[in-house]
Image (cartoon, grey):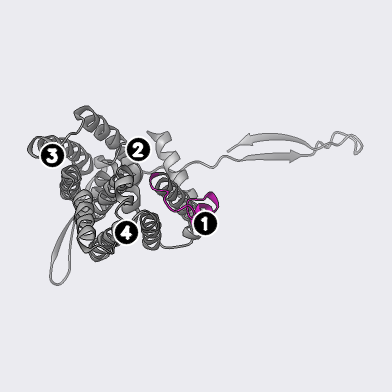
């Protein structure tokens, strides 16, 4: 444990020294991964399905706020969808506007979750995001997870039905256009599986947040364990109620892997020593205060340096004098 704490302190110190550069690099990597996945799933507009364009846009994103990066990702999706079908692009644009209204109203600080959620879906570990946001976010963070889930299923639907959507390009026939709109809306928003995951992730975020906020020892570990159980139970019960096909083994295994990842994240953001808990009482003119203080686990890495001690031996001639030395480590 001591070695892990030393590594943690070294990483935190390194990040503090080079925070500006590290954040820029992480934004660049995140934007590049997101753009590459969008182009791989859609790729209908050849002009932006280009490695040079992806690189340039990713470099620009490394200097932009996260919320603006989310908007750029949405613009890329819209351009691809517009190249496929005008009707589909209109519906997707309306969905994006509705999501952004909810997102910027309730959880504007969770921009990373909107981008990370589709990426984690593709990695088969989407449960990492709601479990993590339960610790570092607020109950309203479920809005960000929900937006990311909708985006993932929307991309999957467009990719799977590209041929059918490409045929509905004529806006001259009102009846045909209305039928196309209805078909697209039903396909994009009519997924019971998407609805189940949005509900399950919202329940997980709220549950983890409430449990970790309780004034009990090891509340964060208890919250993680209950979050895992709640996620599995809600998904399995929802599968039976909504007749949604989900792999039971995949849900359990993915949740456990996600819990392991969140446990590692938890080690860096919340690691305390309950054995040294102190209960403090003080007062002012109006109130008495009872405070429970729990110190963080930390250890300072020892700086190891080598010094050379020099001395002169007066028994030797000047010609034979040499700088002898003794090395010691402190």
Dividing the picture into quadrants, the one containing residue 216 is top left
- Residue, disc 4: 89
Q: Is residue 136 left or right of residue 40?
A: left
Asked if the residue under mark 2 is in contact with the one under mark 4, i.e. CB atoms within 8 Å, the reply is: no
How many numbered markers are drawn? 4
Local secondary structure at mark 4 = helix
Q: Is residue 128 above or below residue 111?
A: above
In the figure, 252 relative to 148: above or below?
above
Taking depth in this image into account, of 1 and 68 the one nearest to the observer is 68
| Residue at which label 2 appears | 123
- The residue that label 1 is drawn on is 59
Instruction: Name which of mark 4 and mark 2 comes first in the sequence.
Output: 4
The magenta span reads 41-59
Instruction: Say if mark 4 contacts mark 1, CB within 8 Å.
Output: no
Ranked by sequence position, the earlier of labels 1 and 2 is 1
Q: Camera-side residue: 24 or 1? A: 24
The reply to whether residue 153 is in sight is yes
Residue 45 among those drawn in magenta: yes
Q: Residue at x 20, y 45 (%)?
A: 194
State the image coordinates of residue 185 (x, y, percent, origin top left).
Answer: 21, 54
Dot 1 alpha-carbon crowd within 10 angstroms: few under 14, some 14 to 19, many 20 or more: some
Marked residue nearer the N-terminal end (3 or 2): 2
Mark 4 or mark 3, which is nearer the start of the sequence?
Answer: 4
Instruction: Please indicate, yes or no, whether residue 297 appears anywhere in the rendered image.
Output: no
- Secondary element at tag 2: loop
Quarter holding the N terminus? top left
Whole-number angstrom distance, CA of label 4 to CA of label 2: 27 Å
Is disc 3 placed on a helix, strand or loop? helix
- Kindly report the distance in space between the C-alpha atoms of the residues bearing marks 1 and 2: 24 Å
């Amino acid at each position: 444990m001591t070695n892990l704490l030393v590594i943690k302190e070294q990483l935190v110190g390194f990040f503090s020294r080079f925070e500006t550069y590290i954040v820029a690099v992480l934004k660049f990597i995140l934007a590049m991964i997101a753009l590459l996945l969008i182009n791989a799933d859609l790729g209908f507009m050849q002009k932006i399905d280009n490695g040079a364009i992806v690189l340039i846009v990713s470099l620009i994103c490394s200097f932009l706020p996260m919320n603006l990066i989310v908007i750029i990702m949405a613009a890329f999706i819209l351009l691809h969808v517009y190249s496929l079908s005008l009707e589909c692009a209109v519906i997707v644009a309306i969905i994006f506007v509705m999501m952004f209204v909810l997102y910027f109203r309730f959880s504007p600080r969770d921009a990373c979750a909107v981008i990370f959620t589709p990426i984690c879906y593709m990695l088969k570990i989407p449960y990492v995001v709601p479990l993590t946001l339960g610790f570092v976010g607020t109950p309203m963070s479920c809005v960000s997870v929900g937006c990311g889930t909708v985006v993932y299923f929307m991309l999957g639907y467009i990719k799977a039905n590209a041929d059918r959507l490409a045929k509905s390009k004529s806006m001259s026939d009102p009846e045909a256009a209305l039928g196309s709109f209805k078909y697209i809306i039903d396909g994009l928003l009519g997924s019971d599986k998407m609805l189940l995951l949005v509900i399950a992730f919202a329940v997980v975020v709220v549950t983890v947040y409430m449990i970790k906020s309780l004034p009990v020892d090891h509340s964060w570990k208890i919250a993680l364990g209950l979050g895992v159980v709640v996620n599995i139970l809600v998904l399995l019960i929802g599968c039976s109620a909504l007749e949604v096909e989900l792999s039971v083994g995949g849900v359990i295994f993915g949740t456990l892997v996600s819990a392991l990842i969140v446990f590692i994240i938890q080690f860096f953001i919340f690691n305390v020593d309950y054995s040294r808990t102190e209960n403090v009482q003080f007062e002012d003119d109006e109130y008495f205060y009872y405070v429970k203080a729990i110190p963080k686990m930390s250890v300072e890495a020892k700086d190891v340096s080598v010094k050379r001690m020099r001395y002169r031996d007066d028994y030797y001639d000047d010609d034979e004098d040499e700088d002898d030395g003794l090395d010691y480590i402190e």
